[in-house]
Every structure is written in structure tokens, then in C-alpha cells.
């Protein structure tokens, strides 16, 4: 029966498409779990500036540029070991005074201004902290002295967007992005344009100790990043989108299989033993069917745990005594009356053997389509819980991306990709399983009438 | 030896007990009110007794709803009798608990009416025949396969290899019934219960299946209980016929006696109803007993056949239950017509 179904699937294009999508989906899941192991994913997703500091905030995916005339810049990032960094010389000026100049150079060809410019410093010294002057050199030769600062820490950051002194010096017009004067041809004009060409940043370092050193890194934050973009915490959304696949797939599969199999077994046990066992199962089902699932899940999420495993168990527990107990029971009642069951009893098959070897195999073909169709509904349930703020606290999932997007007003601020990508992933999942499930239903349904 | 040995007869060492003996068997189904209250009983089998020696075939005939199937189900141990005993080789089949019932079932085969329904549609022939062997505790796969092949040859499904991996829907009705028979005899039972084994088959294969059953019975020295409503197939098969009406066996006799000199008015009516392939039949109406088989919840008082009986003795039959009378050698019937002493009529 099942082997016949495999042959028949080929005649349903929608089933083939659905199956191909599901297989791709499974392949992506396997790849993700191997490439970004669980601990790594959790570490990345919970990481802060130390992990994601070099990423722009709220950047669109790179492919967004394909649809734009004015190209958005990518992030440019280089440290002082980079080959394009020029050492302008290290010399002793006095007994306790050394000077060390470096020059960063990068080419900027995008049509839009970058998001921000950052310089990261790290200094080593005994008593007197080194001192740095940052000079911005534009392609047109103009030099802007950005800041003079002494480097005291292990990780000191200079951000153009937060350099108040610089803003004052430039007399930045109200509401203007502070990076504009650095990159615009004429930032005082009505519509400043990006000046394309090679930009340079000169670091004039003054050291007060012989073995004092200073390391630096330049990041020009772009406005596009990766294939998935970044969120408000500079996190690369690709991590969460990739990890969403195995989480959604395993959650849906486990919940749907658990519910279908347990429901089937409970219905079979009730029908076979009859009497008070059957009556108890029926009454529990009737009470359970009127219980509201979502409010219970929200309560569990608030008072007990938001862990995905706990949610999975609660969802399965609430769903096994569902409407399908009734439909399964109707089929099992017919099966129980069939002569082959009587024959099995007459040759001594035990109760459990009859339930598992004689009744359940008969119903499996009808269970498979509903199992496949049930998978996306559990995936969506998980996503809805996450959007309600009850997502797993550690795991990155599609629902949690949507929740973050909602909380941070992604759509109001035009961060379309933040909502679009996880929604698209959910939609594709639903469509793939629906296409396969409905075709399977058509394949198995004529046999349903035979029962 | 009378066929209805009284319960008290001591089974002496020399006298082997009959293979199966049914004593005062009552199969009553409780009618429930409000799910737990008792509203009465359906008296499907009421006070039935008979003995079945080793290797003998008997037929139980009667209309639909007369209790044949309940009698059979009780003999198979599928329903627990309300009262009475079923003794197999002198042992009550319900006395040994789960293990006793298991051992009893090893020695009984069951051939059902609807061959397609009797075979699990999702199992191959091999699997179907393997199940009873697995339950008999035969662990060795090779031995099981050998026995399956042997039994398939016995039911004339050859070459057996061609059928092993077939599913029931791939077989013809006759082949399906052969698989059912194979399943019934694969554990070498001593007793075979056949519930209308040919009634759902094409006329062309009926005789073959009956001959096959007869042959198997003779080869294995099987005791067979053949349940049917069709007297025309009985003569192929059994030595004795029990006629059942409304939960009671009303006439027990050899095939010859029943067919040639039926005594009970109901048996006479049944025989008259056997269709004969004769064009003349179309020209006259056959006499059949008027009315319907009685309700088993409230069976008629006295003789249960009295409302339909053409030879009713008014004032006696409707009041008092008739005794079992020996009307010939090994020919018993429950009818007042043949009783030597009749109580005085009340009306």
C-alpha cells in the first residue's frame, strides 16, 4: 500500500514540488546544524558588540542593491595589519616621546552614504597612555581633523556618529547624518552627493614610553549586509533564518508525529477495550476540545517555562485528545467488527497484538496525509507563540525574528527584509507541506472509502 | 450411548471423553438500560447440549438469527457463556484461565464466511499464515516457512511460492477461502469450526471448497462443526445434522435420517424449502412456515416453534416445553408429537 503510494506520487506535480522543497529544507537544516552547532548559534545570537560590533545596524540584505539604482555601500573593514595600510614612520622625538603615524586608505564607490565610521583602538602602556589624532583625508584633498584622544583601555571606540566635538566643529545642520560631511561633495548644499574615490585616514600617534604600542581597526559601516541583513543589535539575521529551519522542521515533525501516533493509539485502545476505558477517553476528549489552547500555552509560557521542549510537550499533551480521536474512533469501530479481528482472537492474538498489528496498520494510510498537513500548523503555532513574546529564550527561530521586528517597528521604519524573510520561510514551509499533504490525501482517500 | 450424555456420567478411564462436549450451554447477551441497568437478555443460545467425538463432522442448520453464530462463538471461546459448560477433551475451556484458553485455541481452527473480510488486507499471504505459528511459539523462521508451504500445498495452492507474497485483494474468492482454510489448519487443530464457509463464494467453487474441507477432515481426522443455513450443501459434508431454532437444537440426527425422515415440523419445512433446479417449480408456490423467527428477548412460551407450527397441539405446545425424544436410533427431536407421555392439556 505504502509502496504503491510512492509510485503514485510521481503523477502529482504538486506533490513532487512539495517534496523537493521539503528535501531542500531538510538539507538546509542538516547543513545548518553541522555548520553552526547549537552552542555556537546560541552564543552568536546572544552575543553583543564584541561579536557583532563590525556589522552595521539594521542593514538590508546585499541583494537589495539589485533592485536599486543608487547602490548602498557594503561595510569596509581593515585593521592596521592590512596591506593597504601605510606606515608613515616611527621616530623618537625626545627622551620620552615617540611618534608613529599610520595611514588607512580605502576606495568608496557606492552612491549612498555609509551608516557610520568607527575606529577601534587598543593600547599597551605602563603609566602614560598614548595619544592619537585622527585625520580624515577626502579624495578631493580636504583634510578634517576628527578627534584627538588618549587611548586608555583595551577597547576604545571612536564613532563619527557620536563625536559631539566634531559635530560642533563642523556646524552640522540640524538632522544631518554626521557622516555626510565626511563623504559629501558639498554637505551644505541642498542635496549632497557622495564623493567617490579613495579616502584616507591618518592616525598620528604619540607614545610616551619606549615599549608602548597601539593597535587600531577601521570600520566604515555600510547599509547592506550578507544575504539576510542585520537587526537592531547588529546581529546577522542569516544565523537566525538558518537555525529557524531545523527548529521549525523538528518542532513541526515531532509535534505532528507525536500527536498523530498517540491519538491513533489512544483511539485504538479505547475502541478495543470499550466500556469505561472508551467512555473515559471520549469524555476527556470532549472536555479537552473546548479548552482554549493558546491561552493555556501563554499561561505555561509565563508561569512555567518558555523553553521550546516544554512548549512542545504541552502542545502535544493538549492536542492528543483532539477531534481526530473521534474520526479515528469511527474508523476503528468498523475495523474492530471486521471478521479478521475475530479470526485473530480465535487463534489467540493478545489484546496488544490486535491493537498494534491488526488495527493500527489498517489506519496508517489515512493518518499519513493528516500528519503531513499537521506539520505546518505546528510550525505556525510555534511562530505565533514567539510573536506573542513566548518564544524560546535561547534559540533563534523565525518567530523570534518576527517578534524582534514587530517590537522594533521594522515595517514602520522600512526594514522590510526583517519581516519578509522569516515570513517567506514560514510561507514556503506551509505551501510545501500542504502541496504534499493534499496530494497524499488524494492518493490515499479512495482507500479510505474501502475501510 | 445417547447423544446427550447427562452431566453426571462419569468418564471412566477406558471410556475416552468425547473431543468436545457442550453441556446445557446458554449464551445470553445482557441488554443494558442507561448504560448499566439490566433490561433483560437476548437468549441467543438456550440450553444446548451435544457431544462431538473425534473425527466426526456435524452440521448445525437453521435460519438467520437462530443462534448458530452465537453457538459457534461460544465454542471458539469468543463469548463467555451465561451458564453451562464447554468441555474440550474433558476440560472446561474457561477453567484454565488465560493459559488454558491459549492452549485450547491452539487446537481449534476457524473458517469464516466472508473470505475477504477474514484476511487482514495489509498482510501478505505469508504473513497471514505466519501469525498463528508465531503465536504458537515457533521461533524458527525456516520452520515457519516450511509449514506455510506445506499447508498451501495441502489447500491446493500450488506452486506455493507464487502466493507467498500476494495480498488478499490479488486473490480470487476461492483462493482467499483456501488461505482462510490454510490458516485454520496450519497448527494441526483437532477441531475445525466452519461458519458458512461457502455461502459467499461463486456456485462454481463451492463444491470444490467443500470437497477440500471434507478431504482435509478425513486426512487429519478432524472434528468439524459446520454451520450453515443451506441444507443443500450439508449432504456433501457431515455425518450428523443439528437443526437449530430460536436458540435451541430441536432435532439431532444423521444426514440420512434428516433428509429422508425428518420428524420435527420445522425440519420438514426447512427441507421443503430446499430449491431444486426444476422448471416445474416456477408453476407452484412452495409451502414455507408462515411468520418470522421469534424474538430471542422474549421467546414464545412452551415450544418456541408453536406460533408457526402447522401441527400444533393446542393447549400443550404453547404451554410446556417439549422434552427431547428418541424417535429412532441416534435420532432425537424436541417435539410433543413424538412424546410417549403427554401431560393433560390445559385448554
Image (cartoon, rainbow, N blue to C red):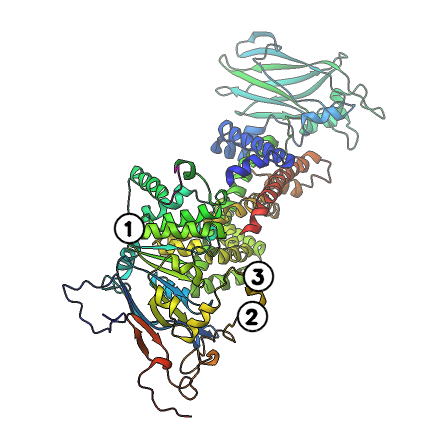
Looking at the image, residue B265 lies above or below residue A263: below
Q: Nearer the viewer, mark 2 or mark 1?
A: 2
**Residue B220: image tag:** 1
Q: CA distance from mark 2 to mark 3?
A: 63 Å
Q: Element at badge 3? A: helix
| Chain ID, mark 3 | A
Badge 2 crowding class, 10 Å Cα cut-off, few under 14, some 14 to 19, many 20 or more, is few
- Residue A208: x and y in percent read 54, 15
| Chain ID, mark 1 | B
Q: Are marks 2 and 1 in contact (CB under 8 Å)?
A: no
Q: Which residue is farthest left?
A: B13
Q: Nearer the viewer, mark 2 or mark 3?
A: 2
Q: Element at badge 1? A: helix
- Residue A329: x and y in percent read 51, 57
Looking at the image, residue B329 lies above or below residue B314: above
Q: Which span is picked out in magenta? A: B155-160
- Residue A249: x and y in percent read 54, 38
Tell me the residue at 53%/53% (across/down).
A319
Mark 3 — residue? A290
Badge 3 crowding class, 10 Å Cα cut-off, few under 14, some 14 to 19, many 20 or more, is few
Q: Nearer the viewer, residue A344 or A58?
A: A344
Q: Does residue A378 appear anywhere in the picture?
A: no
Q: Does residue A254 appear anywhere in the picture?
A: yes
Q: Element at badge 2? A: loop
Q: Nearer the viewer, residue A333 or B215?
A: B215
N-terminal of the pair, mark 2 or mark 1, is: 1
**Residue B104: image tag:** none
Q: Which residue is farthest right?
A: A190
Mark 2 — residue? B285
Task: Please say whether residue B156 is one of the residues in the magenta stretch.
Answer: yes
Amino acid at each position: 500500500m505504502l509502496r504503491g503510494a510512492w509510485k503514485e506520487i510521481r503523477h502529482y506535480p504538486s506533490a513532487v514540488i512539495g517534496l523537493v522543497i521539503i528535501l531542500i529544507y531538510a538539507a538546509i537544516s542538516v547543513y545548518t546544524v553541522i555548520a553552526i552547532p547549537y552552542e555556537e548559534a546560541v552564543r552568536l545570537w546572544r552575543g553583543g558588540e564584541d561579536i557583532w560590533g563590525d556589522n552595521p545596524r539594521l542593514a538590508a540584505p546585499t541583494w537589495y542593491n539589485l533592485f536599486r539604482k543608487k547602490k548602498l555601500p557594503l561595510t569596509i573593514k581593515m585593521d592596521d595589519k592590512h596591506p593597504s595600510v601605510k606606515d608613515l614612520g616611527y621616530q623618537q622625538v625626545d627622551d620620552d616621546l615617540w611618534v608613529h603615524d599610520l595611514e588607512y586608505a580605502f576606495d568608496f564607490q557606492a552612491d549612498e552614504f555609509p551608516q557610520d565610521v568607527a575606529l577601534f583602538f587598543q593600547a599597551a602602556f605602563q603609566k602614560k597612555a598614548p595619544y592619537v589624532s585622527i585625520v580624515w583625508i577626502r579624495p578631493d584633498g580636504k583634510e578634517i581633523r576628527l578627534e584627538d584622544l588618549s587611548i586608555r583601555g583595551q577597547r576604545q571606540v571612536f564613532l563619527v556618529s557620536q563625536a559631539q566635538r566634531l559635530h560642533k566643529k563642523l556646524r552640522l545642520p540640524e538632522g544631518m547624518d554626521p557622516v555626510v560631511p565626511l563623504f559629501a561633495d558639498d554637505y551644505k548644499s541642498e542635496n549632497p552627493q557622495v564623493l567617490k574615490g579613495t579616502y584616507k585616514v591618518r592616525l598620528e600617534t604619540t607614545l610616551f614610553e619606549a615599549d608602548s604600542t597601539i593597535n587600531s581597526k577601521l570600520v566604515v559601516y555600510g547599509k547592506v549586509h550578507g544575504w539576510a541583513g542585520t537587526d537592531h543589535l547588529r546581529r546577522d539575521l542569516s544565523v537566525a533564518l538558518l537555525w529557524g529551519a531545523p527548529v521549525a522542521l523538528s518542532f513541526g515533525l515531532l509535534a505532528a508525529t507525536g500527536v498523530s501516533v498517540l491519538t491513533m493509539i489512544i483511539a485504538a485502545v479505547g475502541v478495543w477495550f470499550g466500556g469505561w476505558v472508551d467512555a473515559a477517553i471520549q469524555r476527556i476528549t470532549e472536555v479537552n476540545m473546548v479548552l482554549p489552547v493558546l491561552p493555556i500555552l501563554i499561561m505555561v509560557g509565563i508561569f512555567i517555562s518558555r523553553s521550546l521542549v516544554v512548549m512542545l510537550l504541552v502542545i502535544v499533551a493538549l492536542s492528543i485528545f483532539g477531534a481526530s480521536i473521534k474520526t479515528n474512533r469511527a474508523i476503528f469501530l468498523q475495523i474492530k467488527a471486521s471478521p479478521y479481528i475475530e479470526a485473530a482472537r480465535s487463534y489467540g492474538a493478545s489484546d496488544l497484538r490486535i491493537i498494534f498489528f491488526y488495527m493500527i496498520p489498517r489506519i496508517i494510510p489515512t493518518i499519513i496525509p493528516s500528519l503531513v498537513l499537521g506539520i505546518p500548523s505546528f510550525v505556525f503555532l510555534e511562530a505565533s507563540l514567539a510573536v506573542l513574546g513566548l518564544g524560546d529564550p535561547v534559540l533563534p527561530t523565525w518567530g523570534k525574528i518576527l517578534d524582534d521586528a514587530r517590537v522594533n517597528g521594522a515595517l514602520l521604519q522600512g526594514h522590510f527584509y526583517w519581516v519578509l524573510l522569516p515570513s517567506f520561510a514560514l510561507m514556503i514551509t506551509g505551501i510545501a507541506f500542504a502541496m504534499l499533504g493534499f496530494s497524499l490525501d488524494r492518493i490515499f482517500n479512495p482507500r479510505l472509502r474501502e475501510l | 450411548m445417547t447423544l446427550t450424555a447427562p452431566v453426571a456420567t462419569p468418564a471412566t478411564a477406558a471410556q475416552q471423553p468425547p473431543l468436545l462436549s457442550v453441556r446445557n450451554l446458554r449464551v445470553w447477551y445482557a441488554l443494558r438500560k442507561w448504560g448499566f441497568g439490566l433490561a433483560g437478555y437476548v437468549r441467543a443460545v438456550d440450553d444446548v447440549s451435544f457431544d462431538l467425538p473425534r473425527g466426526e463432522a456435524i452440521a448445525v442448520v437453521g435460519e438467520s438469527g437462530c443462534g448458530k453464530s452465537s453457538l459457534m462463538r461460544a465454542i471458539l471461546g469468543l463469548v463467555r457463556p451465561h451458564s453451562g459448560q464447554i468441555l474440550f477433551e474433558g476440560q472446561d475451556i474457561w477453567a484454565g484461565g488465560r493459559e488454558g484458553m491459549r492452549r485450547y485455541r491452539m487446537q481449534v481452527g476457524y473458517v469464516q464466511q466472508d473470505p475477504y473480510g477474514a484476511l487482514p488486507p495489509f498482510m501478505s499471504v505469508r504473513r497471514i499464515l505466519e501469525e498463528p505459528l508465531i503465536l504458537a511459539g515457533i521461533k524458527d523462521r525456516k520452520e515457519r516457512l516450511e509449514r506455510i508451504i506445506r499447508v498451501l500445498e495441502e489447500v491446493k495452492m500450488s506452486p506455493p511460492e507464487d502466493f507467498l507474497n500476494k495480498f488478499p485483494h490479488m486473490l480470487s474468492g476461492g483462493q482467499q477461502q483456501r488461505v482462510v482454510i490454510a490458516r485454520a489448519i496450519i497448527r494441526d487443530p483437532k477441531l475445525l469450526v466452519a461458519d458458512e464457509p461457502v455461502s459467499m463464494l461463486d456456485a462454481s467453487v463451492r463444491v470444490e471448497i467443500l470437497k477440500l474441507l471434507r478431504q482435509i477432515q478425513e486426512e487429519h481426522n478432524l472434528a468439524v462443526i459446520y454451520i450453515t443455513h443451506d441444507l443443500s450443501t450439508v449432504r456433501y459434508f457431515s455425518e450428523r445434522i443439528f437443526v437449530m431454532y430460536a436458540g435451541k437444537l430441536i432435532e439431532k440426527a444423521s444426514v440420512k435420517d434428516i433428509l429422508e425422515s425428518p420428524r420435527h415440523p420445522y425440519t420438514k419445512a426447512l427441507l421443503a424449502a430446499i430449491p431444486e433446479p426444476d422448471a416445474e417449480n416456477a408453476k407452484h408456490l412452495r409451502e414455507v412456515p408462515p411468520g418470522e423467527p421469534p424474538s430471542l428477548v422474549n421467546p414464545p412460551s412452551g415450544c418456541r416453534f408453536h406460533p408457526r407450527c402447522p401441527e400444533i397441539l393446542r393447549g400443550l405446545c404453547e404451554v410446556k416445553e417439549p422434552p427431547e425424544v428418541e424417535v429412532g436410533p441416534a435420532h432425537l427431536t424436541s417435539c410433543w408429537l413424538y412424546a410417549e407421555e403427554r401431560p393433560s392439556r390445559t385448554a
